[in-house]
Image: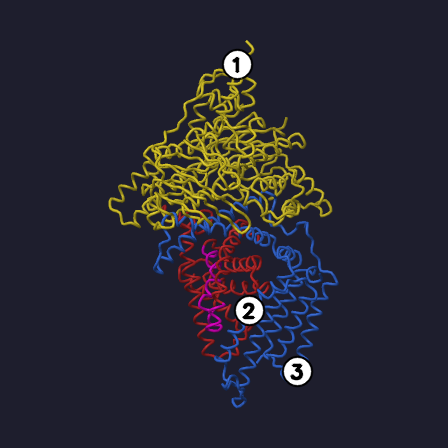
């Protein structure tokens, strides 16, 4: 079969950097074939996407060598725009893929670009929207859609152009678990209906592994170090995968921890349940948790309510936050997690009720003193940066206080956060993971004892994630209280000493994680929560053991 | 309604034409008559909520008032110094008063014409129509539309950045210099994020096959129909009538 | 249009949105100033209207950047709800031409602080001529008109020229301008 994509000896370097972002990339892809493209942050995955859809070398500031053939023709021989009929891309950020105001206009935009006749357009728009089940939103304003719906719209826009190859460039990185599942489900359904090849770029593999068996693995130098079956890679190149910070499927990861020499590795919980009878003795793993310290209350809320004109965001919340706890706040999007955390940090004033910090009402605190007690790490760390170098960034709040031996202190913090060698860089030029750690650094430099974090592990590779969690655990060990909002149940299970579930603006559960996992599946479903993979596996094992013991 | 269905480009050009014509008039009668005409047309042929209209009109009134009194005070020396009007017991040259009235009425006229346009036009359609009727390059048209989508994002970001900086202990500025530094700290992350968003959007649009080529098809097609010419015609009738009446009354004054 | 990267044009539009929000915030202030001082009230802050063209020209450094960006900014303005409507586009083009003239005089080679300030003054001049005709400044006393003109030029040089440069330089330091002329210049400077 003639390959649909053929890449030979592709090397690419940006003007801004000394080294190649992609080195000697060669691979082939048959028509209709699906492949996972995995690699740590900064390994050039998105750059490769730009090469495949013809944007590079046209829009490249830098040098590119090697050949790329799409459907037997060099990408540079296509006229600008022509390749969009062959290769379509869904990008990561749902906010920046559109230029029109309504759904139908946006789908039409692509069709207009390829010169589709006016008479055909309406039917094609309907067809594309129905493929992603978005027909009823045809006339909606794009601004009124949720993140997940926006990504489905982005997909519909691409599908309307009927490309032979679809590239998904981390399409779920900004979505919550429910929307992620929905998008993956939508794509799975498409595969039966229309023919297309698929390149999937993702950090977390959950849900994607049954879409593609083959994977291409990139390392930090931008080289392909593996091309073949994912199972085989996990079996044979596991160390390399981990070294490169590539996430393994959670199920595989968990099983490997207890049985490192396992031959046949299930990639999903469903697969595991089929294997379960042969694998019954998966021992539960010790958690990484550090114990909670004292039970002194550091922050408490009494009957806190916050409402906007339209509705109550937070209603009647009374909670205690003990000194030395590691607390996870979980819940569906829009359940009030972020609002609660902002109220706790004194960023948002509640409409009624009171917040006490160390026994003193929040409103009686002097702002500058409060900031020495409470740190808050925003979802997008860039928003918090205010100076021109990493060093100054950390030094900033110490300068406000004219502290002596500042330099020493800053260096120490930078070392803890593994940022010391970057201290002269501009904060904006750091990688995602480094930015997160820097914003944590700025929030612990005053020895803040109460640290709030809003989804700090969003969209990071395995390596940055581990570094961040290690850092937080260190803080916890040295006595800080950590409160983090997260969608990642694995983190909740591994690190949290207590979990608070938010639903419709109020806490509906407040207990140690184990207790939450024991609640009925109906309840968890209502709160849009999923059990962590480790717990799911343990439950299967228990059932299996029960089954064995009752039948023998 | 008629005004809503009008071709947006033609509507805009008509408005521009009359703004230019108004700039030639320096007497108060012509603009006051034309003002009545424009406002009547707006409410007769366009479905406009009068409360909102008034709300938008008020800032122009304030502006016009400022125009009025300063023009009286800072007016150029009048040709006929003895022709005097008494207002609140003060003497003013009649000519200065008339010119001041003319200028502030001009402001109100421009306001009425603008509001006629913005209250009856889908502005996104205006941009699309400029591409189809006025040869606006597609690269500019779609960049502007894409930029418009950033507006709510920017508003949210300003708020987030404000909060994020507060948490860092920034907002203790008291002197003007500190405040100025704070504004600068805000603006850099805001602009940086705008630029990055713009780059990503441009990339997404190009990967959907956008090249900026003028030869493209349109899902929303705008044309100028014969009935569209009715609007400039009606406005011209109103303007000519105003000029004639003003002339008959002996007030008409064209570019002095 | 052919020698423009689409990316550059969208960036202009995005910058325009940010300043569009700023403009809208300034409009009522301008209104109040006019209420007190008459037409000259606007002239104090008039420079803020030209800042996009200075920033775009300084960052992108292509012939037409100042004109195009001010035109786009005006269109974005209309779109985000400026009540002056379609007239604003003409105003934007007139202002853009003034700034563009200053850059054209150096054959688009020189982007020093003086030229940026001159560009701000250029916008002030063209916008004043346009305003003289459209708003009937002819009826005002020559002394007052001269004062307006001088204030507007100073505002153009300081707010548009100086502030525009300061913001662009701050942006260049963050590295987000790496694919634009100003970012490339910074890199060369740092490498040297």
Chain bearing tag 2 is: B
Q: Does residue B228 appear to the left or right of B187 in the view shown?
A: right
Q: Mark 2 points at which residue?
A: B60
Give the percent coordinates (x, y) of residue A236.
47, 20
Chain bearing tag 3 is: B
Give the percent coordinates (x, y) of residue A257.
44, 21
Q: Does residue A472 appear to the left or right of A526 in the view shown?
A: left
Numbered tag placed on residue B140 in the rendering = none
Callout 3 and callout 1 share a chain: no
User: Judging from the image, what is the letter of the chain drawn in red?
Assistant: C
Q: Mark 1 points at which residue?
A: A278
User: What span is colored magenta in the figure?
Assistant: C31-58
Which residue is more in the foreground, B142 or A522?
A: A522
Q: Mark 3 points at which residue?
A: B247
Give the percent coordinates (x, y) of residue C101.
49, 64
**Marks 3/2: CA distance?**
27 Å
Nearest to the eye among marks 3 and 1: give it. 1
Q: Does residue B111 appear to the left or right of C155 in the view shown?
A: right
Colour for chain B in the figure: blue
Colour for chain A in the figure: yellow
**Marks 1/2: CA distance?**
81 Å
Which residue is more in the foreground, A134 or A127?
A: A134
* Up/down of B177 relative to A164, above or below: below
């Amino acid at each position: 079969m003639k390959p649909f994509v053929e890449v030979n000896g592709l090397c690419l370097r940006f003007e801004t950097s000394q080294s190649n972002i992609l080195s000697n990339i060669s691979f082939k892809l048959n028509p209709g074939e699906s492949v996972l493209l995995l690699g740590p942050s900064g390994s050039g995955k998105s750059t490769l996407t730009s090469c495949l859809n013809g944007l590079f070398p046209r829009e490249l500031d830098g040098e590119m060598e090697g050949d790329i053939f799409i459907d037997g023709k060099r990408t540079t021989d296509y006229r600008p725009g022509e390749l969009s009929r062959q290769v379509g891309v869904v990008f990561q950020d749902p906010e920046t893929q559109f230029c029109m105001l309504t759904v139908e206009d946006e789908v039409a935009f692509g069709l207009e670009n390829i010169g589709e006749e006016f008479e055909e357009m309406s039917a094609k728009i309907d067809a594309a929207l129905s493929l992603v089940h978005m027909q009823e939103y045809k006339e909606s304003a794009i601004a009124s859609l949720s993140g997940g719906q926006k990504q489905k719209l982005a997909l519909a826009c691409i599908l309307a152009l009927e490309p032979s190859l679809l590239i998904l460039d981390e399409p779920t990185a900004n979505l919550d678990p429910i929307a992620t599942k929905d998008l993956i489900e939508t794509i799975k359904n498409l595969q039966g209906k229309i023919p297309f090849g698929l390149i999937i770029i993702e950090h977390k593999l959950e849900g994607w592994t049954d879409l593609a068996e083959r994977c291409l693995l990139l390392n930090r130098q931008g080289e392909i170090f593996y091309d073949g079956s994912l199972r085989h890679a996990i079996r044979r190149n596991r160390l390399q995968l981990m070294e490169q910070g590539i996430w393994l499927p959670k199920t595989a990861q968990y099983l490997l921890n207890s049985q490192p020499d396992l031959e046949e590795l299930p990639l999903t919980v469903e697969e595991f349940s089929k294997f379960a009878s042969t694998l019954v003795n998966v021992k539960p793993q010790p958690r990484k948790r550090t114990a909670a310290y004292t039970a002194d209350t550091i922050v408490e809320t009494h009957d806190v309510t916050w409402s906007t004109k339209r509705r109550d965001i937070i209603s009647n919340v009374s909670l205690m936050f003990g000194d030395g706890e590691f607390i996870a706040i979980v819940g569906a999007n829009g359940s009030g997690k972020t609002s609660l955390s902002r109220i706790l940090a004194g960023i948002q004033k509640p409409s009624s009720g009171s917040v006490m910090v160390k026994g003193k009402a929040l409103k009686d605190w002097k702002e500058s003193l409060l900031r020495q007690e409470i740190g808050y790490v925003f979802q997008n760390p860039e928003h918090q940066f205010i100076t021109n170098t990493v060093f100054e960034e950390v030094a900033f709040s110490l300068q406000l206080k004219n502290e002596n031996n500042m330099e020493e202190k800053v260096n120490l913090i930078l070392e803890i956060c593994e940022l010391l060698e970057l201290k002269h860089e501009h904060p904006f030029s750091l990688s995602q993971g480094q930015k997160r750690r820097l914003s944590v650094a700025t929030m612990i430099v005053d020895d803040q004892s109460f640290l709030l974090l809003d989804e700090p592990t969003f969209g990071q590779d395995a390596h940055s994630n581990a570094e961040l969690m290690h850092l937080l655990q260190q803080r916890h060990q040295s006595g800080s209280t950590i409160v983090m909002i997260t969608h990642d149940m694995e983190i909740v299970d591994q690190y949290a000493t207590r979990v608070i579930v938010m639903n419709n603006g109020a806490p509906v559960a407040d207990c140690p994680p184990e207790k939450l996992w024991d609640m009925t599946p109906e309840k968890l479903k209502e709160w849009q929560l999923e059990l962590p993979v480790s717990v799911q596996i343990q439950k299967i094992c228990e059932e299996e053991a029960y089954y064995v013991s009752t039948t023998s | 309604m008629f005004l809503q269905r009008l071709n947006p480009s033609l509507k805009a050009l008509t408005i521009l034409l009359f703004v230019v014509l108004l700039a030639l008039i320096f007497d108060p009668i012509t603009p006051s008559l034309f003002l009545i005409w424009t406002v009547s047309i707006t409410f007769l042929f366009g479905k406009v909520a009068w409360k909102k209209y008034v709300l938008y009109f008020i800032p122009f009134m304030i502006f016009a008032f400022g125009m009025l009194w300063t023009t009286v005070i800072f007016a150029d020396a009048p040709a006929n110094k003895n022709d005097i009007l008494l207002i609140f017991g003060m003497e003013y040259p009649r000519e200065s008063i008339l010119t001041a009235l003319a200028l502030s009425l001009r402001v109100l006229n421009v306001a009425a014409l603008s509001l006629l346009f913005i209250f009856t036009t889908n502005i996104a359609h205006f941009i699309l129509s400029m591409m189809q009727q006025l040869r606006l390059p597609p690269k500019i048209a779609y960049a502007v539309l894409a930029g418009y989508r950033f507006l709510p994002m920017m508003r949210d970001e300003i708020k987030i950045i404000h909060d994020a900086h507060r948490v860092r202990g920034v907002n203790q500025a008291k002197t003007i210099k500190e405040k100025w530094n704070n504004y600068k700290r805000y603006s850099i992350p805001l602009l940086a994020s705008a630029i990055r968003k713009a780059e990503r959007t441009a990339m997404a649009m190009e990967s959907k096959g956008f090249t900026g080529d003028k030869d493209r098809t349109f899902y929303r097609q705008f044309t100028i129909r014969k009935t569209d010419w009715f609007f400039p015609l009606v406005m011209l009738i109103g303007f000519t009538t105003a000029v004639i009446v003003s002339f008959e009354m002996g007030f008409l004054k064209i570019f002095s | 249009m052919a020698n423009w990267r689409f990316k550059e044009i969208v960036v202009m539009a995005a910058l325009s949105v940010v300043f569009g929000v700023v403009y809208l915030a300034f409009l009522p202030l301008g209104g109040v100033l006019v209420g007190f001082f008459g037409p000259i009230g606007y002239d104090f802050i008039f420079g803020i209207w030209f800042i996009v063209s200075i920033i775009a020209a300084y960052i992108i450094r292509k012939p037409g950047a100042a004109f195009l960006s001010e035109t786009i900014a005006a269109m974005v303005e209309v779109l985000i709800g400026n009540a002056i409507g379609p007239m604003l586009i003409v105003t934007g083009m007139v202002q853009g031409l003034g700034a563009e003239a200053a850059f054209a005089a150096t054959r688009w080679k020189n982007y020093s602080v003086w030229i940026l300030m001159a560009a701000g003054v250029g916008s002030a001049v063209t916008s004043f001529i346009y305003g003289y005709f459209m708003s009937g400044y002819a009826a005002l006393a020559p002394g007052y008109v001269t004062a307006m003109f001088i204030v507007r030029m100073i505002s153009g040089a300081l707010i548009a020229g100086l502030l525009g440069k300061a913001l662009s330089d701050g942006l260049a330091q963050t590295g987000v301008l790496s694919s634009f002329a100003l970012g490339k210049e910074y890199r060369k400077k740092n490498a040297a």
